[in-house]
Amino acid sequence: MSHEPGSPFGGYNFAYLDENTKRMIRRALLKAVAIPGHQVPFGAREMPLPYGWGTGGIQVTAAILGPRDVLKVIDQGADDTTNAVSIRRFFSRVAGVRGTTRTAEATIIQTRHRIPETPLTEAQTLVYQVPMPEPLFRLEPRLAETRRMHALADYGLMHVKLYEDIARHGHVSTAYSYPVMVGGRYLMSPSPIPAFDNPKMHRMPALQLFGAGREKKIYAVPPYTEVRSLDFEDHPFRPHRADGCCALCGSTTSYLDEVLTDDRGGRMFVCSDTDYCEERQEAAATAAPASTTPAPETEGVA
Amino acid sequence: MMQPGFTDPVLDGQSVFRAVLEATSRPGRVQEISAGLTPPAPLHPATAAVLLTLADTETPVFSDAGAAAAEWLRFHAGCPLVAAPATAAFLLATGAPPALEEIDLGSDEAPQEGATLVLQVASLAEGGALRLSGPGIEHEHGLHVEGLPQGFLAARAALAPLYPRGLDIILCAGTRVAALPRTTIVTALPRTTTVMEG
């Protein structure tokens, strides 16, 4: 395969980044996997899209991606939003990799703020786009201080914050970016995924990599690693889910988005994971072509 | 004459890295490296491929592999070679590695600065007498290592209380790679200790 100008990659190196940058990111990734939950600084490069659009995730994906990979990109669970489409197209242009929307087909899944509903396997790697890697930043703005707190595993401040939430509101008022302890040692931000997705991180068979471009940090959760959402014995962690079922596929267990349908208060709930929803609709259509109402799942989530 | 490096530095580097990433993510699983290198003795193809993939001008390398290997690394990876183990980011050991307390283990605030030891052994296979547990391992992985330096596992185990500081180890033999990141707990089944002392 040629990497010269005029090559299939539009004059860029395979997967856009130069080899020195990839090596630097790869070294950071290996250390991140070796120290689960610890934020490893890296020299994030300027990317052809702005901060906040997944520059960290893209650099991680570019450093691991090979020609035989199949890439899925989701934005809030959807494969067809601007961010997801542009990133998938970016990698098809600069690396020639095949894109997919099917969770089960993908070898690398880059995600913004969701974990797919379909359970991931050992053959897959999940790459998170992270806006703010530091879980303590609202409590302690000085990075020098948070580094020391991580070094000493001094996370009392976060417990106090959760306690104050409970004292004030009766429950923990964090619905996304809900802090987790990784491997019993590091407090970690799961990126702004809904707390609903937190339990999926626990002992996941797939490798989970996190990239924060603006904050220049990489961290990781190896497969089968303990990931616990912070809670108290008398206030156990409870993932939140809208009380309803998907208007399209009838799922009562998937994470739902609320969609406004008119300006008179009309609304409906649909699966946030578009691939999961479509596969369920297709399955329902083939199972019972005459029926118009999809069968709801039996198991519910409180 | 100097032996060649990667035929395709971009794609060979990528595939070797994925093998090392997989090995590090799932300690004890043995990965096959297919980059087809013919490095100077005493380097095995896997050892050479791992160093070419990860080392460059930014990473000082300590090597015990002799002048030909050092020259090959300097030419193809462009890495500075250092004599003091404490200043190296990567340590290449084809025999007994330097005393582990001489190696940079990082600090509590920056544990990622701990060095990586690329340890070449005689052979590697899954399902051996070493029982591995920790992050990346569902229940337990078995690993068979031939040619591990005597007392090495005990010296490594002595570093565990220092976590998150620590030393990450990439084991290479022939075209095979396995890893022992600092979080992996290794216990040897007692009756087969002769195997690990190879």
Image (spheres, helix red, strand yellow):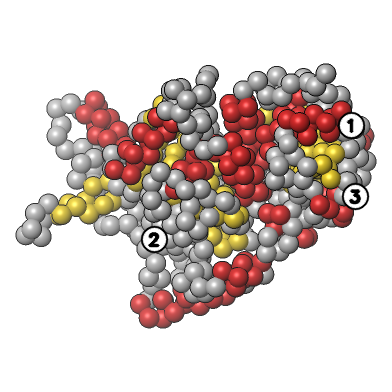
Callouts 1 and 2 close, C-beta under 8 Å: no
Lateral position of residue A292 relative to residue A28, left or right: left
Secondary element at image label 3: loop
Question: Relative to residue B122, is residue A182 depicted above or below?
Answer: below
Identify the residue at horizontal 84%, vertical 33% (top origin).
B70
Amino acid under label 1? Ala
Q: Nearer the viewer, residue A68 or A187?
A: A68
Q: Mark 3 lies on which chain?
A: B
Q: Which chain carries label 2?
A: A
- How far from the left and from the top, in percent, is residue B29? 68, 33
Question: Relative to residue B90, is residue A241 depicted above or below?
Answer: below
Question: Relative to residue A60, is residue A106 depicted above or below?
Answer: above
Q: Which of A91 and A280 is in front in this view?
A: A91
Identify the residue at horizontal 72%, vertical 34% (top origin).
B77
Q: Which of marks 1 and 2 is in front?
A: 1
- How far from the left and from the top, in percent, is residue A285? 21, 29
> N-terminal of the two: label 1 or label 3?
1
Secondary element at image label 2: loop
Lateral position of residue A280 relative to residue B102, left or right: left
Q: Residue A5 carries which label?
A: none
Residue beneath disc 3: B99
Lateral position of residue B30 relative to residue A232, left or right: right
Amino acid under label 3? Ala
Q: Which mark is residue B67?
A: 1
Residue beneath disc 2: A176
Identify the residue at horizontal 77%, vertical 45% (top origin).
B60
Q: Which chain carries label 1?
A: B
Q: Crowding near pointer 3: few (<14 within 10 Å), some, many (20+)?
A: few
Real-space CA distance between mark 2 and mark 3, rounded to the nearest whole angstrom:
46 Å
Identify the residue at horizontal 61%, vertical 39% (top origin).
A20
